[in-house]
Image: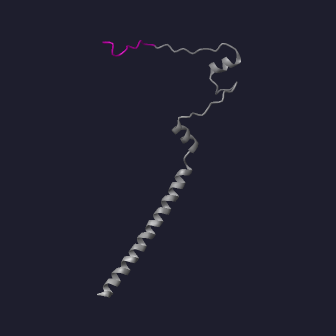
Amino acid sequence: MLDVLGAIGSLLVVLLLIAAAIAVTAVIALAAFVVMAGSMVRWRHLWRRLTGRERRLTVKLSGERVPERRRGELSGRTPRLRRHFPLEVRRRRGAGV
C-alpha cells in the first residue's frame, strides 16, 4: 500500500515539475513577445494622441510645404484665394423638402 502511495506521489511531483517548466517557458516567451511588440510602437506619437496634444508645426518662410495663403501673408503680398463654386444647387434636408 505504501509502495503505491509512494509511486503516485512521485508521479505527481514529476507532473508538477513538468507543468512548472511549461509555465516558466510560457512566461518567458510572453515577455519576449511583449518586448518585441513594444519596440515597434511609436511611444511619443501614442502618448501625444492619448493626451490630446498635437505636434506644433514650424512655419517656414518659403517652400512647397507652406500653404500659399500663409506664404503670401508672411511675404507681405495679397494672397490669392481659391474659391470653389458648386455646379449644382444642393437642397437642404429637413425643411419639408
Identify the main secondary structure in magenta.
loop
- Residue located at (54% from left, 51% from top): 38
* Rendered view: 4 above or below 40: below
- Residue located at (33% from left, 13% from top): 95
84 or 49, which lies in front?
A: 49
Is residue 26 in the magenta section? no
Q: x, y (%) of residue 37? A: 52, 52
91 or 45, which lies in front?
A: 45
Q: Is residue 10 left or right of residue 46?
A: left
Numbered label tally:
0
Q: x, y (%) of residue 53? A: 56, 34
* Rendered view: 51 above or below 5: above
- Residue located at (56% from left, 51% from top): 39
Q: Is residue 63 left or right of residue 18?
A: right
71 or 52, which lies in front?
A: 52
Q: Is residue 2 left or right of residue 38?
A: left
Q: Quarter-wise, where is residue 82 in the image?
A: top right
Q: x, y (%) of residue 92? A: 37, 14
* Rendered view: 81 above or below 60: above
- Residue furthest toward the left? 1
* Rendered view: 71 above or below 47: above
Q: x, y (%) of residue 59? A: 66, 27
Is residue 91 in the magenta section? yes
* Quadrant assignment for the C terminus: top left
- Residue located at (44% from left, 68% from top): 22
Start-end of magenta stretch? 87-97
